[in-house]
Image (cartoon, rainbow, N blue to C red):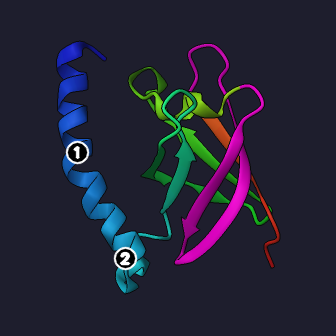
Amino acid sequence: MGVEGHGRWAVLNRTWNPVLSGILRSPLHRLASGRFALITYTGRRSGHRYTIPTFYRDKGREVTIAVGWPDTKVWWRNLTGDGGPVELVIRGERLRGHAVATRSGDQDAIVRVRVDDRS
């Protein structure tokens, strides 16, 4: 994706992400929470906490997030190597876990979250 394509993507994220995040935190979360979750992670350099909406696949004790177009996104790189702690909001439920991001070649990046103490 070229710079022009990335610019459009960034504008879409700045407008859509806050709207989707608000829905996922509200009683209306059922409108989107079957496919979207919120992930909160800490930036390695900044130490700031960030929360973004993502597509997810719930496998019980493991949640998998595929990061499409990983070259245009930087958030998942904070979870490479040993990974780090994250918080998730899935279907209105707040979860904590440990996430590790991996990428092989030109494929999408994958973030696997091992969920703590989930019933």
- Please report whichever mark, 1 or 2, sits nearer to the chain's N-terminal start: 1
Horizontal arrangement in the rendering, residue 101 relative to residue 90 (left or right): right
Please tell me the numbered disc located at residue 14.
1
Give coordinates of residue 13: x percent, y percent: 27, 43
Q: Amino acid at mark 1?
A: Arg
Q: Write down the residue under mark 2.
A: 31
Write the start and end of the magenta stretch as one range.
81-109
* Residue at 25%, 62% in the rendered image: 19
* Residue at 18%, 38% in the rendered image: 11
Give coordinates of residue 103: x percent, y percent: 65, 23
Give coordinates of residue 46: x percent, y percent: 48, 32
Q: How dense is the environment of label 2, judged by Cα within 10 Å: few (below 14), some, or many (20 and up)?
A: few
Determine the main secondary structure of the stretch shown in magenta: strand
**Do labels 1 and 2 touch, CB within 8 Å?**
no
Looking at the picture, tell me which residue is in the foreground, 85 or 69. Answer: 85
* Res. 9 image quadrant: top left
Judge whether residue 107 is colored magenta. yes
Task: Determine the secondary structure under disc 2.
Answer: helix
Give coordinates of residue 87: x percent, y percent: 61, 59
29 over 19 or under it: above or below: below
